[in-house]
Image (tube, rainbow, N blue to C red):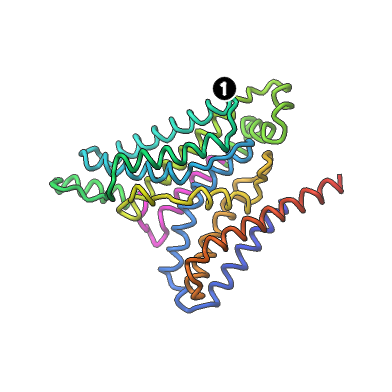
Amino acid sequence: MSRVLGVLVMVLALYGVLMCLDDNARSLGNQQTIAGRLGFYGVLTVGAGILIISGGIDLSIGSVVGLGAVCFALLLQAGVHPALAAIAVLMGSMLIGLCHGLLVTKLQLQPFLVTLCGLFIYRGVARWLSPTSVGLTVRGASQSFEDQVEAFRTLLVGNGLGVPHHLLILLVVALILGLFLHGTRHGRYLYAIGANEEAARYAGIPVHNYQILAYVICSTLAGLGAILFILESRTANATSAGSWLELYAITGAVLGGCSLRGGEGTVAGMVLGAAVLPLLRQLCNFGGVSSDIEYAVIGLALLLGTIADELLKRRSLRRG
């Protein structure tokens, strides 16, 4: 709870500074931009956070987003209905997570190595499928098909009543996974596995099944992020689409209270942690800070979050 309160104070402080920095920062358009980015980053962060709680890690999230975005656009080019294309991307992402989980559990490979290899593999496959950028515009498509694509885009990334649909999707995802993680025995099993895998195994928990489930959840949400990405940007370059998004996701989860050791974290904290990076980006924009320093700011935020996690851990051990 202390970590959640700490990141809440951080988010409120960053938001307050941003609102005082520039009059344009208080505009409706900027509020929608922040909310939209929170929704997008939050979906990826929750997936990464669930996996981190179980003791795993995924470095391929950005490449899965890039591959999923390219595949979604190519399916549209082939005349597939956008809803069916989205289902195909989600199914493919689930399969990627399943492969990760099987390699980690059945072959006992290191999660870092498995997902690092995945980072290169999925990016390479995306570039092989589409050497150039692909978009939502389909040459020779009928007006009805274009209307279907636009309607699907409005459904997922529109701004109904001024609220970006990205944010609503995040709230639904957070609610479902929050109930799963904090309100069911399955969620408690994930915490137990992340805290002490051997103890969980001796307690009769099917450790491998739940670890595979965590990888599937993470990759599936990365697939959802891919769909949101291509619908929002309308185009995807196989070389750069989704680059560094694993950094955003892991950073948001750690800032939100997830320990890289596993066994700790809350969905509420993940959502708040995901809000830090969009606010930092807007602070850089309105503060005239060069975008070249953005990654340095992200790295510093991750370092501070890790230091805070270590200090809180030591404090709790002394109290115990």
Q: Which residues are magenta?
A: 156-177
Could you tell whether 225 is left or right of 235 in the image? right
Q: Amino acid at mark 1?
A: Lys
Residue shown at 72%/26% (left/top)? 198
Residue 46 to residue 183: above or below: below
Which residue appears farthest toward the bottom when viewing the image? 23
Q: Nearer the viewer, residue 179 or 289?
A: 289
- Per the image, the residue denoted by label 1 is 106
- Quadrant in the picture for residue 69: top left
Mark 1 secondary-structure assignment: loop
- Residue 157 colored in magenta in the image: yes
Magenta span: predominant SS is helix
The x and y percentages for residue 204 are 69, 20
Label 1 neighbourhood size at 10 Å, few (<14), some (14-19), many (20+)?
Answer: few
Could you tell whether 99 is left or right of 112 in the image? left
Could you tell whether 173 is left or right of 138 in the image? right
- Residue 57 colored in magenta in the image: no
Q: Quadrant of the C terminus?
A: top right
Residue shown at 66%/63% (left/top)? 9
Residue shown at 59%/49% (left/top)? 253
The x and y percentages for residue 11 are 60, 62
The x and y percentages for residue 265 are 65, 45
